Amino acid sequence: MTPASSRDDLHRFANRPIAVLFSGGDAPGMNAFLRAITRFGLNLYNVPVLGVLNGYRGLVSAAAQADADLEGLKALTEKWTGRWGLVNDRKPQHLVFMDHPSVSGIVGDGGIILGSARCLEFKKPEVRAKVIEVLGKLGVRALIVVGGDGSLAGAKCLSEESNLRIVGVPATIDNDLEFSEMAIGVDTAVSTLVWAVDHFKDTARSHRRVMVLETMGAKSGELARLAAIASGAEVVIVPNEGEPLTEQGMQILAASIEVGFDAGRSHTIVLIAEGVTFEPEVMGHDTHSKRNRAYVLADAFKDYFTRPGGRYADLEIRPSVLGHLQRGGHTSPQDCILSARFAEAAIHEAMKEDGRNGVTALVNGEIEIVPFGAPPLERTAKRVRDYLRLHRALSSWTPVGNE
């Protein structure tokens, strides 16, 4: 394998590149962002875009490589560029200069071609200091970090500990970054959940079943809330300000399902967010403490419906954990558009002489640069209440009143 020839393959570090990395869990739209930031860098500013393979882990590895042989790192990175750098298996390569062919056709692809990885070693101040030193020696004019709360926390550390220009970009299906109305990946993940619910609904109707489906979303419950409204799921259970779900609470939920069947429902879809916790009495012995929430809840429902005198003792309760299905798939148009808007704001801020460090955010439909550690939007709590109110009114078969 030999690298492709290009008129600008050499001396790209001399042109002070912008570096980009993706960290933490992958989110649909990350490839769309990489394409956009590469095209903006090359087309608007004629500045090289340096992709960091495997997130902070790749950055730490590149720093170690540079510490041993800085010129060798530069030579390797300038030789194997674009697609050649992405597939170079002859030498360990952690940095790749992106070009137009390397991002062509990836706008709708899920995952991230640069790779995304967590790196516990990056939490050490001395490791970050070495990274900062090497980025300076490489002439990197700005670092763009794309990811969730942990990734942006790392970017905040770099911002505080260096004179580098650091721009964060929210990308997480959890949508738990409350300074922005939306993060990259949420729209696609919700669409995937709706697709999954539609398939479970077919068999639930056919066999008069209750399907208990566990969603991702960390501690926020946002993904479950949105998917419940969009899919028509009858019940949604999300974290309640740290309050655990009790035995009594699950009985109340089961009773509401029973009322629905009394009213003529043929099935029930229950969405439970992975951030929901249970009181210790519900979990039982320590050997059961790691059981998936969907299975714990399904067992509680079975106990309720098979109680003496229960009207639906033969009702089937089927749990399922949707898991990482929600992270993949073709990126939705909305996420592709949001990725492009975030990338445009990030590149402009990175290239400004008087630009500032911060994070791209969607606020009132507009893209802004907010400081690292910005407080939640004032209407975030109201939005959560509105979603739950909407779902309750839409899912009930009995009057709920006008709240």
Image: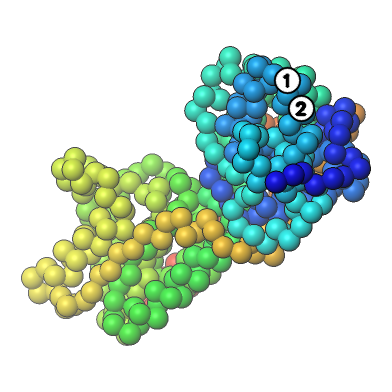
Categorize mark 2 by other alpha carbons within 10 Å: few (<14), some (14-19), many (20+). Answer: some
One can see residue 84 in this view: yes
Front residue (pair 361, 55): 55
Height in image: 152 above or below 211?
A: above
Front residue (pair 162, 398): 162
Q: How is the image coloured?
A: rainbow
Residue 70 is marked as 1
Going 25% across and 55% down the picture, which residue do you hit? 296
Marks 1 and 2, Cα distance to the nearest angstrom? 6 Å
**Residue to which mark 2 is pinned:** 74
Front residue (pair 174, 137): 137
- Percent from the top left, x then y, of residue 20? 71, 38
**Relative side of 94 to 310, left or right:** right
Going 27% across and 58% down the picture, which residue do you hit? 295
**Relative side of 223 to 132, left or right:** left
Going 54% across and 19% down the picture, which residue do you hit? 124
- Percent from the top left, x then y, of residue 339? 72, 52
Q: Amino acid at mark 1?
A: Leu
- Percent from the top left, x then y, of residue 341? 77, 52
In terms of secondary structure, where does tag 1 sit?
Answer: helix
One can see residue 369 in this view: no
